[in-house]
Image: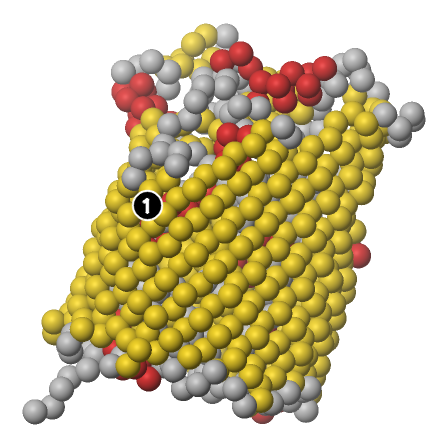
Amino acid sequence: MVLRIPTWIALLLLGGGTAIAQTPSTQGGESTSTSVDSLWQLDMDPVVVTATRAERRADEVAVPVSVLGQQEIEAQGAARMTDLLASQPGLTINNDHGSGLQMRGLGADYTLILVDGEPIIGRTAGTLDLDRLTTANVERVEIVRGPTSSLYGSEALAGVVNLITETPDAPLGGQVRTRYGTHGTVDVSAQLDGEQGPWQGSVFVDRYRTGGYDLAPGTLSPTRPGYVDYTAQARGQYEANSSTTLSLRGRLASQAQDYAVGISADGTQDEIRHTQQNERLDWNGTAEIEQQLGAGWRLTGTLYGAGYHTDQSLRRVSDGTICSESALDQYHGEAEAVLRGALGENHLLTVGAGTTVETIDADRKMGRRIGGFGFVQDEWSPLASLDVTGSLRLDGNSDYASRLSPKLAVRYAPFDRVSFHASVGSGYKAPAFRQLYLNFTNPQAGYSVFGITEVQRGLRQFEEQGQIDTFFRDPSALGEPLSPETSWAFNAGVTASLWGDTTLRLDAYHNEVDNLIDAEAVARKTNGQSVFTYLNRNEVFTRGVEARITLRPAPRLRLQLGYDYLEAKDRQVLEQLRDGDIYRREDGRDVQVAPSEYAGLPGRAPHSGTAQLRYRYAPLGVTAHVQGTLRGRAAYADLDGNGIVDADREYLEARTLWDATLSKTFRDDYTLRVGGENLLGYTNPRRVPSIPGQEWFVELEAQF
């Protein structure tokens, strides 16, 4: 009798014991397979781990998953993770609260960011600033679209992004990279790695400095202040025997800023010079042991700890008076055990359990949260053409009642060139510490964010200092307790190879969120930036369609096109509109707002698109990459006080950004890159201060 073993079980049995997928081996800097977005037809589909926490081929996963490999990262010439993800289809960088990632209409608060499978902490307004993360030592980025709470918990309602750093593949090697760009940007990094017998290790350091920029020279405060950022990472692995592997990973990053701020006094136009100083330190460390148990089973135990610290102070230059200062300390600890193994011929079982401890100390506000979790997942392949994956996670917490998060995903491939997939999942999210206690002013953009317990005190302090220009909401009406959130999400799609190497993928999704906790602008400061706090929205839905197509018109040429339609609205607002309860003021009279005039949640463009063209001529070592990103007109902010965006002046106009990079490799060891970003020079200093206009860079990389 011949046993049929599904590909994913074979990968588990043969792939060894790492929790992070490895890319194909490289020779002379060239990957032996193409590691790019798996939603677009690949020469060889990569193995991914983020979607199911077990090794699976990307084309066999029942949920939307994509992979950016090292070739793609280098072709784009992206220095920070913000630059890399901004041009990806279905992803939007929301710069109102820092460089956060918005996915499928859900804010950055609902996208979990991992480095080597472990969460990065330290969010502001729900945003984990992607500018904190360098791409210099990233080997691949796995992106899972749609809820993954059944495996990763509450911060994975919208999706998961996992940054996987490089692992040694030679006895001794490394690279040095230096980059110079517009606005005095200098990025220098170095990496040394190697393996010898059972030992494997690497060390990486990076220094990133930017001088910032100013789109409004008439003010003392720059639009985006400069800063210096340092990152150091190290990892080591030891194979004690054929069944046991021990590994350690660590990361340390810091940022420092010091810049001038102009604050109006007594409501006048005269600005008084102040100095804003900001410091940030974050770290994390992981210890892991993996034990092969035989018969395809393995047990992994992980200890993970992370810390995040910020200090901010505002000092009047004339007399040295400290006008305000704040500090925040956050810690996260986690212990987890995961057991994986094949049950019979057609089942792959993953079972995990663990405990978490979180603490925060933010300006006389302290919190502590202890929790536990357990999850189980079964990947069942009853037929060669059918995969069914079911998962369930139970979270318990000292702050709220236990919650179950189930998910079911199905993939059916009746033909070699066509497959269908569908999934449904539930998620749950309690108010985070930052949504309760945060007191933060962004050192680069100048906006402020207050937790619900801090907003009244913070607004009163800003008003006394003369920093408030306009209130969008009555401060006395703010501060009500936040309610937890619950959600359900649905996804269905098809992938088809149309002809030759042309691939099309379509996905339709629908998310229902009750009591959505979202950041909302409640005041505008005299520097033009906003003050945000957190509010519950009654019932919110996001739904849309994602379309991806890849064409290869020539052997060395690849064209990727993406289009996304998105609708994101508050059901309570829609009900008020249908009842005729919302008006706006026009020409001195009240005009009833029609449901069709409601723009939806701010910062969500109904229409967006991407285009990427890459040409590679291997004999000369030349790669040319051009990419364009279209963001349609999107709701910006309620300016007339009726609570919604419905008038033309409340929109952010559509914009198109084009980038280009040209790379040339010499003697297989040296690569020169030159590139330009925002080639058309789009700017909107007031509403999109994160886009500085045209930028250029030159980069030199040496491998040894």
- Residue drawn at 71 percent across, 76 percent down: 176
The image shows a total of numbered marks equal to 1
Residue 89 relative to residue 135: left or right: left
Q: Position of residue 325 (x, y in %)?
A: 73, 31
* Residue 46, horizontal then vertical, whole percent: 39, 76
> Which residue is farthest top?
588
Q: Residue 177 at what x, y percent from top left? A: 71, 73
Residue 159 in view, yes or no: no
Quarter of the image for the N terminus: give it.
Answer: bottom left
Find disc 1 in the rendering and name its residue.
395
Question: Residue, x 50% and y 19% (percent of image)?
Answer: 479
Tag 1: Cα neighbours inside 10 Å, few (<14), some, or many (≥20)?
many
Viewer-closest of 297 and 581? 297
Quadrant in which the C terminus appears:
bottom right
**Is residue 321 visible to us here?**
yes
Give x and y (percent) for residue 501.
34, 78
Single out the residue that lies furthest toward the right. 318
The amino acid type, in three-letter code, at marker 1 is Asp
Task: Name the side, left or right, on which 655 lies relative to 691.
Answer: left
Q: In the rendered view, does 641 fall on the left or right side of 422?
A: right
Q: Nearer the viewer, residue 108 or 672?
A: 108
Secondary element at image label 1: strand
Q: Is residue 552 above or below residue 332?
A: below
Q: Which quarter of the picture shows residue 47? A: bottom left
Say whether residue 37 is left or right of residue 137: left
